[in-house]
Image (spheres, coloured by chain):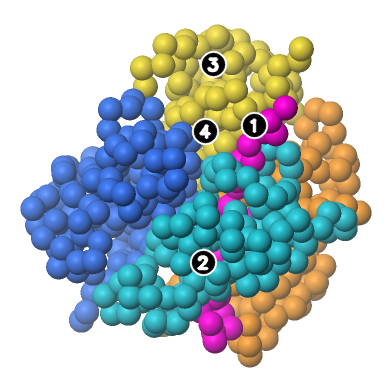
Chain colours: A blue, B cyan, C orange, D yellow
Amino acid sequence: MSDPRQPLMDPAALNAFLREAFQQVADDFVVEDVKPFEVTVRTPIRTRHLRPGGTVSGPTMFALADVSAYVATLAMIGPKALAVTTNCSMDFMRKPADGVDLVATAKLLKLGRQLSVSHVLIHSVGLLAPVAQATMTYAIPPEPR
Amino acid sequence: MSDPRQPLMDPAALNAFLREAFQQVADDFVVEDVKPFEVTVRTPIRTRHLRPGGTVSGPTMFALADVSAYVATLAMIGPKALAVTTNCSMDFMRKPADGVDLVATAKLLKLGRQLSVSHVLIHSVGLLAPVAQATMTYAIPPEPR
Amino acid sequence: MSDPRQPLMDPAALNAFLREAFQQVADDFVVEDVKPFEVTVRTPIRTRHLRPGGTVSGPTMFALADVSAYVATLAMIGPKALAVTTNCSMDFMRKPADGVDLVATAKLLKLGRQLSVSHVLIHSVGLLAPVAQATMTYAIPPEPR
Amino acid sequence: MSDPRQPLMDPAALNAFLREAFQQVADDFVVEDVKPFEVTVRTPIRTRHLRPGGTVSGPTMFALADVSAYVATLAMIGPKALAVTTNCSMDFMRKPADGVDLVATAKLLKLGRQLSVSHVLIHSVGLLAPVAQATMTYAIPPEPR
């Protein structure tokens, strides 16, 4: 896109915001990179994310897709804790590598006043083929007047 | 459907299977009812499921939709720990009631040899309007010969 | 739902609206029944809807799901030609019966000021098992002031 | 992806296949480019694709997404008319430009023996921001033995 808008928050600002607003789960997500309309977020895999046999759980992948689309939106519009997910579609394509961190790249395809729409690819670190893709829609709360 | 197949597992058998196969998260899901091609599963909401402000988190709702579609499949085909989610689509329609249990009803719309397809409605206990809907596809592992 | 709202349009009014607003395709859709938050719409299958071998095409099923969710919304809010689909997810579960009409039942699960969310089941007339399910989100244009 | 597989069909072969297998609608789709795991398909917009006011209809966009994911799959595995769509999710993000051709780019994210999974972006020719995105799953028929 040739949309000239630039990010309003960098990785440090986004990580600080997540720690403050979602302290229960902030350890699960590290914003690693921010570009215009695109972010990269890592989930450091710990025992609580695993299913028997060592594979990463579905809710762990959903949570990463959800947070990365949220972070992609916030990076462009600034901190608004009230944005909410309205729709998500996910394809689970391959078994994640056992016990390896997951990294999501979320691209904002639409950033309107009321909605953002993203496409997210999730990889196991070190594997070239993605383990999952997701499309996410966020509703953006109206500005207070 | 007039499909004559009947469930092979009842709530007690399904709850025992979840506790054995997914011990880390089995406390989060209680199978309450099983009918042909339909199950009801409850998530007793605890502090770890909440976001700031008291609302239930998105991953908690995803996990409930995922498990209820899995349980609906297993109830009909018997215990197969290896069935995996391949696709999920969710609409988050309303804010769940604060701190109230969630109940999911999953209906199996297709039960083939390779795939099951379900529709899931999630309610906050005590509210008539659903908080979320989901469609889930599970891949069923082939029979060992 | 115990939502007390009642339909503002009956099948005759909805069919007249479709013929006026979408004259190119109105022959493809017949509104057969309207209840609160639920409608039934039929597509009379003609040669142009078929693929080689006689099966009904995917776009024919998509169009029926799309129109039935639109009609379910309009039945409750009155004629607004400008409502637009924002999201659709479909599972194609079985091959439709050759050359047989399709009937869709669309249930409105959410009817807010800005969005409606529906679940649609499509059947081949005479078959008990559904051929497809869809979830549809429509954006409702704001009222002129 | 570093998957070394190369396309088995080029644009001419794919266009010839579409004309033979789907003669009713083959005019609607022109395969313009084929790379490993990626294809570009154009829909030349004609009056029958338009809604009142000049906008391109939803089913036209669905059909383009569906065909482009199918073509992306066939390009890699060769002509198999029996591959069928099992799941589709679409976000309609912007109004297409009036009367302008649509171009879809479909990327194959997974190409297994039984399933292919794609991500599709649709643009109005001349506009940088995409009008729609879709994720498509195709079931691939087993090899005859």
Are callouts 3 and 2 both on one chain?
no
Mark 2 and mark 1: Cα distance apart in space: 32 Å
Name the residue beneath numbered marker 2: B29
SS category of the residue bearing label 4? strand
| Sequence-earlier tag: 3 or 1 | 3
Closer to the camera in the image, B2 or C33:
B2
Range of magenta residues: B118-145
Real-space CA distance between mark 3 and mark 2, rounded to the nearest whole angstrom: 42 Å
Res. C26 visible in picture: no
Residue closest to the eye, B56 or D119: B56
Measuring from the top left, give residue B6's x and y in whole percent.
81, 58
Q: Are marks 3 and 1 in contact (CB under 8 Å)?
A: no
Residue shown at the point (52%, 33%) measured from the top left: D117
Q: Amino acid at mark 2?
A: Phe
Are the residues flagged by discs 1 and 4 from a single subunit?
yes
Residue designated by label 3: D76
- Disc 2 versus disc 1: nearer the observer: 2
- Residue C49, relative to residue D71: is it above or below? below
Residue that numbered label 1 is attached to: D139
Disc nearest the viewer among 3 and 1: 1
- Is D132 magenta? The answer is no
Q: Chain of mark 4?
A: D
